[in-house]
């Protein structure tokens, strides 16, 4: 079995995927997805395949159709307002 990042291939799929839900509060630097091409970075997001929150706030999702009319899911973070 090949090794990927110190984890056996048998369990590698368990580490990938979406790590947060819509409406969840996150802090800057929180990992939102791992190894996923299913989600695209929106506002206040850093990264391409592993998406990370750039600021503190609330997670929300949007759907847009791209050039080929294929629907894509964008992950965004609504910044926390200072009161």
Image (cartoon, rainbow, N blue to C red):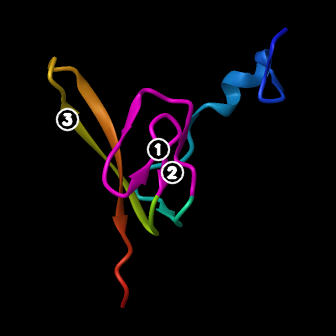
Residue 79 relative to residue 11: left or right: left
Callout in the foreground (1, 2):
1
The label shown at residue 76 is: none
The residue located at (20%, 35%) in the rendering is: 64
The residue located at (57%, 44%) in the rendering is: 19
The residue located at (52%, 49%) in the rendering is: 20
Residue 46 located within the stretch drawn in magenta: yes
- Residue 83 vs 80, above or below: the answer is below
Labels 1 and 2: the sequence-earlier one: 1
The label shown at residue 47 is: 1
Q: Which residue is mark 2?
A: 52
Residue 37 picture location, percent across and down: 44, 26
Residue 78 relative to residue 52: left or right: left
Asked which secondary structure carries label 3, the reply is: strand
Residue 14 located within the stretch drawn in magenta: no
Q: Which residue is mark 3?
A: 64
Residue 7 picture location, percent across and down: 81, 27
At label 2, counting other C-alpha atoms closer than 10 Å, the crowd grade (few under 14, some 14-19, many 20 or more) is many
Residue 48 picture location, percent across and down: 45, 37
Labels 3 and 2: the sequence-earlier one: 2
- Given residues 82 and 41, the one toward you in this image is 41
Q: Quadrant of the C terminus?
A: bottom left
Residue 29 relative to residue 58: left or right: right
């Amino acid at each position: 079995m090949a090794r990927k990042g110190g984890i056996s291939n048998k369990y590698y799929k368990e580490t990938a995927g979406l790590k947060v839900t819509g409406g969840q509060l996150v802090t800057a630097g929180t990992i939102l997805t791992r190894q996923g091409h299913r989600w695209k970075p929106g506002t206040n997001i850093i990264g391409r395949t592993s998406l990370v929150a750039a600021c503190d706030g609330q997670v929300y999702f949007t759907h847009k159709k791209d050039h080929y009319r294929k629907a894509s899911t964008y992950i965004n973070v609504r910044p926390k307002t200072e009161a």
